[in-house]
Image (cartoon, rainbow, N blue to C red):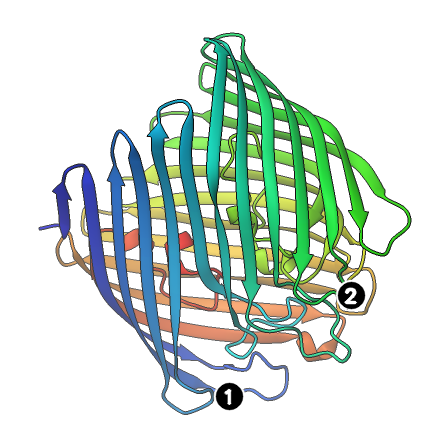
Amino acid sequence: MALSVRAQAAHIEYGLGYNGIYTNNIFRSPTHKENEYINLFRGLFSYQKHGRRLDTHLDLEAIGRVFTLGRYRNDVLFGVNSLTHYIIVPKAFSLSERDIFTQAPIDPRFVMAPTNLQNTNAFSAGPNFSWYVNPIDAFKVDLRYRNFYYQKEPLTNPPTYSTSNYRWVAETRFVHAFSRRTKASINYVPEVVRYQNTLVNPDYRRQDVFLGLDTRLGNLGLTAQGGRTRIEQTGQPQALQGTLARIALTDSLGPRSRVTASADRSYGDAGRYSLLEAPAQNLILPVAINPGQIIGGGLYYGRMANLAYEYRRPYGVDRISAFWQHLHYLTATLSQQLEGGVFNIGYDFSDRLTDSIFGDYVKIHYFNFNADTRDFGGGMRVRYRLSPDLSVSLEGMYDRGISTDPVLSYNEWRAIVGISYMTNPNRMRTDPFVHYTNAIFY
């Protein structure tokens, strides 16, 4: 019986899980290899309610990690993912809230290990106003206060970059509907950014002016934007100006599969959290496969491209994605080019037995220092469902890092056993060292 409760359009799911992990290189070091046995205890709670006026979604997760041999201190990790939209006056006035609490690397240049981990929180809230001149033309204004908190700064002296900040944003646009499937817009988005530490990253004001198009042709959806950006930094006599160009395509190949592709050429801000910056319909931001790579600095001018395929099986999801990014930082020494891909492909032998193989490859070239890296790995996971809610799993993985800086090279083998009791087993990731975000965002 599924642990699911429905009342007044509300949906609740929750679960508990345990993973036993063995690793032969807990420090991910080329020379100081130490094995470790990790006990992971996990709890997940999810609440969703969709009504005529209120839409809300809340995910909560807690992970307790016990390092049996004492290589690291035992700890507890938390995750929060909340989204609320409340309509006060239909088609005129509403309120929105978004919050993500998770973990990310302290310094994205170094290998992902338990000590290179910090808490981060991204919060956004504000009102939404709409004024319909007629049935096909409308003025819309979304006001946002956003706060981005990062627990720690990189362990460099002096600090290479500072990330915690808050900002005020006004997303204003005039929208014209050519048809039910096609809309065009004129957009003006002013933004004021204030950093907690302005030693390296000065505060700045930003203005985006661009045209937007949103259309759907059958199963194909197209969103495009084109315009200019102007940025005025405190203490800098000359303003920055550059092109803003974005395009995103989504093609539903069937009821269970879809392909998405996006490209972006614009100024970006590494101090923000990319998952949080795309709640507005008129904003496209490719989400990096590794969010940690764009956390650690201030302004950058970026070119990005992403391609992804997704297929929903009866008892799992297959994903294949590839990405390319070229990020030129204006203040931090993190200018880099990334390319790589991730895949997870499974096969359902029956309603009880599922097998999947997975892997990833990331190549990073830094322009300012000698730390080019190639990280790749993969493995196999077998899951057996004792009941619709209860499942056991067995997993084997290999991960390899190769860097021009020998200290950052490593190889590691991991074996994982697990048991989980929850309504949606696909939401419970087994290995906390594979992805940098929590399982609720996986």
Q: Position of residue 21 (x, y in %)?
A: 37, 76
- Residue receiving disc 2: 200
- Residue receiving disc 1: 34
The amino acid at mark 2 is: Val
Q: Quadrant of residue 264?
A: top right
**Mark 2 neighbour density, 10 Å: few (under 14) some (14–19) many (20 or more):** some
Q: Position of residue 11 (x, y in %)?
A: 20, 44
Is 39 located above or below residue 210 in the figure?
below
Q: Residue at x 72, y 37 (%)?
A: 207
Left or right: where does residue 356 sit relative to residue 112? left
Q: Residue at x 83, y 64 (%)?
A: 368
Q: Residue at x 57, y 56 (%)?
A: 290
* Disc nearer the start of the sequence (2/1): 1
Q: Quadrant of residue 43?
A: bottom left
Q: Position of residue 49 (x, y in %)?
A: 25, 41
The amino acid at mark 1 is: Glu
Left or right: where does residue 120 sit relative to residue 51? right
> Is 207 or 133 nearer to us in this picture?
133
> Is 338 or 101 nearer to us in this picture?
101
For the residues labelled 2 and 1, the Cα–Cα distance comes to: 37 Å
Q: Quadrant of residue 27?
A: bottom right
